[in-house]
Amino acid sequence: MGSHGKGASRVDTVVTDVAAGHVAIGTRMPRRLRHARSIEDLRVLARRRLPRAVFEFFDGGAEDESTLRDNRAAFERWRLVPRMMVGVGTVDTATEIAGSRANWPIVIAPTGAPGFAWPRADIAIARAAATFGIPYTLSSSATCSLEDVAREAAGAPWFQPYILRDRPFFARLIDRAEVAGYQTLVLTVDMPTGGKRERDFRNDFGVPFHWTARNVCDFASRPAWAMQLIRNGVPRLENLIGLDRSGPDISGAASSVGRNYDPDFDWRGFEAIRKRWPRTLLVKGILHPDDAHRAVELGAQGIIVSNHGGRQLDGAIASLDALPAIVAAVGDRVPVIVDSGVRRGSDIVKARALGATAVMIGRATLYGAAAGGAAGAQRALEILTEEIVRTMRLCGMRSLDDLGRGWLVRQDAQPPGAAMAAGEGSEA
Ligand SMILES: Cc1cc2nc3c(=O)[nH]c(=O)nc-3n(C[C@H](O)[C@H](O)[C@H](O)COP(=O)(O)O)c2cc1C
């Protein structure tokens, strides 16, 4: 598995087309997808196609969903301060992420059970990621086996194991990832137990899964989706086969209880994994700078600042708000990636300006895949990348390397030069 992208790149050819509003890649894209102009448009298409329980499993967050909402609000709290007459005919969006060159500062986040969005959505999204020259992260709760994804998805996917109570099973999982050629392991550490996702309970999409009148009616209300599921077989959590007696079926999808996760996992456990995994190791789910610092001291080669898209601890700090302190703590030593709430190219530009190397996106490509499989995932990436370029041009940014805090002000703060304008003295 090689590195991503085409090396130090100016991606103006693709970018110019995309920015002009044309679909640069994937000419056989259905009309409804071509007409989706935003990630929210894809979300609406996904909602129309999926049964309620499945849509809400993808879309929802924990408890009152306050962290889910705050993840979006955190991006809104920052405003861009554009500069003019810079000459932005060519913009450079390439970046290095954990040792690989990527065409965009985006990584696909690991998401469980994507096969309920579309058959083999894992591979569809991974291929879309490879087309755009960005890394894809396969979840251990994926619906395709890690070997199939390594074989069938182009590019160099990353692998994310959850820390399981069944330690021998967990050890075998990461050994399998090594044998299959994965270069990067993303260790998710924010799941000592599952978050309380109440929508799943209300929709009878919980653990253990039981067929009920409610979920039978719900699934039957989306015949096209149900037929596709029947034709292709009910997705299974292929990497977790043999993990527990109930089997890797739909019950594993709605992980509200999280009975397989290891609540005793601690820093000693982390050190053991660091010793076992010989390649790049990133840690996902960090929100405190001291944890970031300790993880790096113990050998983490990158930190993913994440509250799991608001699906774990409700009331947790928005990931974007946690980012600056973590960048200050470890950003000079390792890449810092941030996720949770990214829905616009301008969000990605803001995250870069706050010191992130890249963002991870979870629901954005899931909505796309749910709306239209591979073409939908591709459309999600077209939308986001087009928005990045447009934002950079409108801001007068030639390269992502130019980005820093000078491009941003807090929504409630005074804009640059305001003190001088108010006669409060010179800024010199
Ligand atoms: C349906 C769904 C399933 C997820 N499954 C996993 C998973 O298996 N492993 C993991 O580390 N994170 C998982 N996450 C969290 C994502 O990796 C990521 O942190 C989150 O989706 C980012 O927020 P966003 O969806 O707003 O982009 C999941 C998220 C969603 C929406």
Image: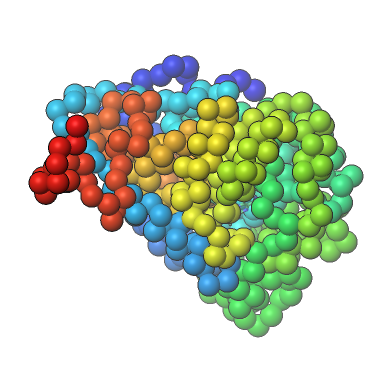
Q: Residue at x 10, y 46 (%)?
A: 423
Task: Locate residue 239, reporting x and y percent.
Answer: 76, 46
Measured along the vertical axis of the image, is residue 262 above or below residue 186?
A: below
Seen from the viewer's position, the closer of residues 153 and 98 is 98
Measured along the vertical axis of the image, is residue 317 above or below residue 344?
A: below
Quadrant containing the C terminus is top left
Task: Locate residue 407, reporting x and y percent.
Answer: 29, 37
Could you tell whether 374 is left or right of 148 in the image? Answer: left
Could you tell whether 366 is left or right of 232 in the image? Answer: left
Task: Locate residue 43, reporting x and y percent.
Answer: 43, 59
In the displayed orientation, state which residue is furthest to the front: 425
Number of marks: 0
Task: Locate residue 183, reporting x and y percent.
Answer: 68, 27
Q: Residue at x 33, y 44 (%)?
A: 346
Could you tell whether 271 is left or right of 423 in the image? Answer: right
Seen from the viewer's position, the closer of residues 78 and 135 is 78
Can residue 140 be seen in this snapshot? no
